[in-house]
Image: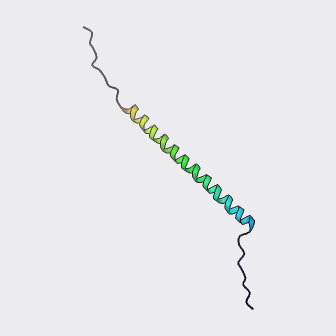
Amino acid sequence: MSSKKSVPGPSKSETRAEQTTAIATEIIDRETSARTAKTERLRAARLQRDADLKKPAKRTAAKGKD
């Protein structure tokens, strides 16, 4: 007589915990991606603004009073 002992699967609470962890990880990853994109966008805007401020204004020849 051979008895096969099956390995018990994860309990119901472990399965729920795994689902919760997966969903939380997905949400965190989305938030991180959004934050990174926003940071890159703001950095590019700041660098563009700084570059525009450092450009010297075009000067026209001053007209002398005769």
Q: From what the image shows, is residue 41 above or below residue 54?
A: below
- At horizontal 32% and vertical 25% (from top left) the residue drawn is 58
Q: From what the image shows, is residue 7 above or below residue 24?
A: below
Which residue is more in the foreground, 10 or 39? 10
Q: From what the image shows, is residue 28 above or below residue 55?
A: below
Colouring style: rainbow
Q: Position of residue 11 (x, y in %)?
A: 74, 69
Relative to residue 5, is residue 25 drawn left or right?
Answer: left
Q: Position of residue 39 (x, y in %)?
A: 51, 44
Q: Position of residue 59 (x, y in %)?
A: 31, 23
The residue positioned farthest toward the bottom in the image shown: 1
Quadrant for the C terminus in the image: top left
Relative to residue 65, is residue 20 drawn left or right?
Answer: right
- At horizontal 74% and vertical 64% (from top left) the residue drawn is 13
The residue positioned farthest toward the top in the image shown: 66
The residue positioned farthest toward the front in the image shown: 1
Res. 9 image quadrant: bottom right
Quadrant for the N terminus in the image: bottom right
- At horizontal 27% and vertical 14% (from top left) the residue drawn is 63
Res. 3 image quadrant: bottom right
- At horizontal 73% and vertical 89% (from top left) the residue drawn is 2
Q: Position of residue 28 (x, y in %)?
A: 61, 53
Relative to residue 4, is residue 55 drawn left or right?
Answer: left
In this rendering, the count of numbered labels is 0
Which residue is more in the foreground, 46 or 28? 28
Q: From what the image shows, is residue 53 above or below residue 44?
A: above
